[in-house]
Image: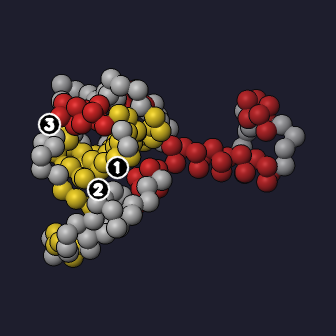
Amino acid sequence: MRKSNSLRSTFGGRSRTAKFTVASCALSIALVTGCGAEDRDDVLKGFQLQLPPCPTENLTFSGQTSAPGISLAMSFTAPTGCVEQYLKDHHVDLSHPLYWPASGWNSVGGRKIPPTEPPFTPESMKQFKLKLDPNKQYKKYIGFRTPKDAEFTVLLDPVGEMTSLYMESDLAGRVGRAD
């Protein structure tokens, strides 16, 4: 097989093992991040979602707006009043929270769910670095919606005058579709 000049110059005097290692790393990065990895602003735009207008801290983020795998997981800490307004602006009724841990066992589709089952996927729990105390009660909301009809589960962790908000998409709605 004929080698191209660009490959020859890139891998020049490297051994076959070094070439294999470089190629393996490139493939691993492509598989983990996706070839067309989207930045935060593009994903937020795709979901028609903005960060709240107040200062935020400790922002974590992951997401994509192309199929397969349309998703968004995000967390931040902000003043409690700002977090509450952010939820209201996205159709959340603050007077009807759910709680984590739940008050008892639930069942969905015949599957028994323990009251302390994490509220988010393992990937999001790891991203959020979220270690929930089963002896504390956290407010949880479903139905946070964006103009693209994406829906999220939200969990709040208030500390003093600040609240940490954790959110993960449940339904993609019309994200990824041209309007």
- Reading the image, the residue beneath label 1 is 157
Residue drawn at point x = 79 percent, y = 49 percent: 18
In the figure, residue 80 lies in which quadrant?
top left
- The amino acid beneath tag 3 is His
Where in the figure is residue 111, as x and y percent of width and height?
20, 75
Circle nearer the viewer, 3 or 1: 1
Can you tell which quarter of the image residue 63 is in? Answer: top left
Question: Tag 3, which secondary structure?
Answer: loop
Q: Quadrant of residue 115?
A: bottom left
Q: Are marks 3 and 2 in contact (CB under 8 Å)?
A: no
Q: How crowded is the residue under tag 1: few (<14 C-alpha within 10 Å), some, or many (20+)?
A: some
Pointer 1 and pointer 2: residues touching (CB < 8 Å)? yes
Looking at the image, tell me whether mark 3 or mark 1 is earlier in sequence order: 3
Residue 130 vertical placement versus 69 (above, below): below
Residue 26 — which label?
none
**Which of disc 2 and disc 3 is earlier in sequence?**
3
The tag earlier along the polypeptide, 1 or 2, is 2
Distance, label 1 to label 2, CA atoms, is: 6 Å
Label at residue 91:
3
Determine the residue positioned at 31% across, 48% down: 156
**Residue at image mark 2:** 138
